[in-house]
Amino acid sequence: MAALQTNGSVLTRLLWARGLRAFADGYVSLLLPVYLIGLGMSAFEVGIITTGTLLGSGALSLLVGLHAGRLRFRSWLLLACALMAATGIAFALASDFWPLLVIAVVGTLNPSSGDVSVFLPLEHALLADTVEDNRRTGFFARYNVVGSIVAALGALMAGLPQVLSALLHVDGLTALRCMFLLYAVLGMACALVYRGLPALRKTEEGRGKAPLRKSKRTAYTLAALFSLDAFGGGFVVQSMFALWLFDRFQLSPMATGTIFFWTGLVSAVSYLAAAWISGRFGLVNTMVFTHLPSSLLLILIPFAPTLPWALLLLIARSALSQMDVPTRSSYVMAITPPEERAAAASVTSVPRSLAAAASPALAGYMLTLSTFGWPLIAAGACKIVYDLLLYFRFRHIRPPEEQARSPRNHLIPGR
């Protein structure tokens, strides 16, 4: 009974922290390009700084994942919260390109609608250790539902600087800086949530040993595939997608925030659908056969003749594009030994930052040449290739709960 109560407390606190961070990411990802353009930067410079945020997050996530056994998970999470608070304060104070780029690289800003931060591998490992195999995908879906819904609410806050500017009679840049200070406050609030976690164990591996051994081959293969998906996704991280909407349809931050609010709600529903679909058709099938049509829809968006058609395609894509998120996380944790999960989560999630890091700069350069939407086409093409490679490489590698339902026992390479 005590163990159940402890597990329930861990899950509740992880969901609260995920929600707080998602709220911050929801508005920061939309206001980041607005703030940088307000400082006089070009679309290419916005892309460079966005690249810096992804590159730094990926490197830090990899470092933490590979050394997760040196400190307890709670200690790592508290350190990450301190960095989040410092990032918000520093970004609010800086105005020049180079200082902002340095802060973007070493800080925790997230230009994406999903979670690509240093918190990710730690929370995934804790979540997987806390629930049973047959409930794991459902809890990952709930974790992502919370993130999506609260990020959608955060997106609505993208219009708050405009309201603050009018009510308080301050200039737009000052109002935007207040939003980055709010980001710092939310980082401190996350620390209060994490402080209540029990003194969770370190990873079971001793110091100085390689974190990945049994699952090394499988994790690296998945990491390579996720790199391709991440590279494609980098062309359309929320900050760059918002910049395209600003340029193509002359939308305001408030209108763009409303759009991403609705797409976030649609994505939240899709997370729940993903848990149900994966229970019937398997994790890999769910990942691939929902992701493929969403990539095709992404390619079609630039060809939309009017804003309503573009929004229709965007919402349709949102209903499918995120179903691979909880299923992917659950799949990685399922085929990895418990003692290696923090390292595997880091090694397979880091490509969502590192491989994506080059794409925003390329997207920014494309947008300086044309508002047509070439970054969206490039993203869709990369993602289609990823889907096909993932299916043909991993369709026969099943997690324990699927093996239990199947009369055939599928071997997992590298384990």
Image: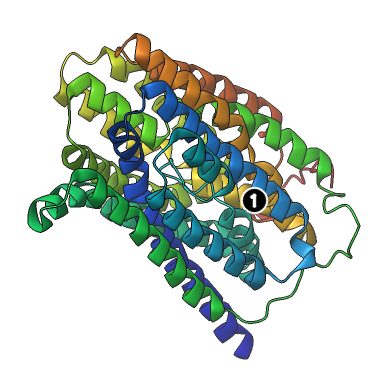
Task: Please tell me which residue lies in front, 257 or 332.
Answer: 257
Q: Position of residue 17 (x, y in %)?
A: 46, 67
Residue 301 lies in quadrant: top left
The residue under the point 79% across, 66% down is 70
Q: Is residue 159 left or right of residue 352?
A: left
Q: Position of residue 159 (x, y in %)?
A: 19, 47
Q: Position of residue 340 (x, y in %)?
A: 78, 56
Residue 32 lies in quadrant: top left
Task: Please tell me which residue lies in front, 4 or 102.
Answer: 102
Establish if 123 lies above or below 331. below
- The residue to which callout 1 is attached is 402
Q: Is residue 267 left or right of residue 13?
A: left
At label 1, the amino acid type is Glu
The residue under the point 51% across, 62% down is 139
Instruction: Confirm whether residue 378 shows in the render.
Output: yes
Instruction: Confirm whether residue 335 shows in the render.
Output: no
Establish if 170 lies above or below 97. below
Q: Is residue 305 left or right of residue 239?
A: left
Determine the secondary structure under disc 1.
helix
Q: Position of residue 69 (x, y in %)?
A: 79, 64
Residue 387 lies in quadrant: top right
Q: Quadrant where the N terminus lies?
A: bottom right
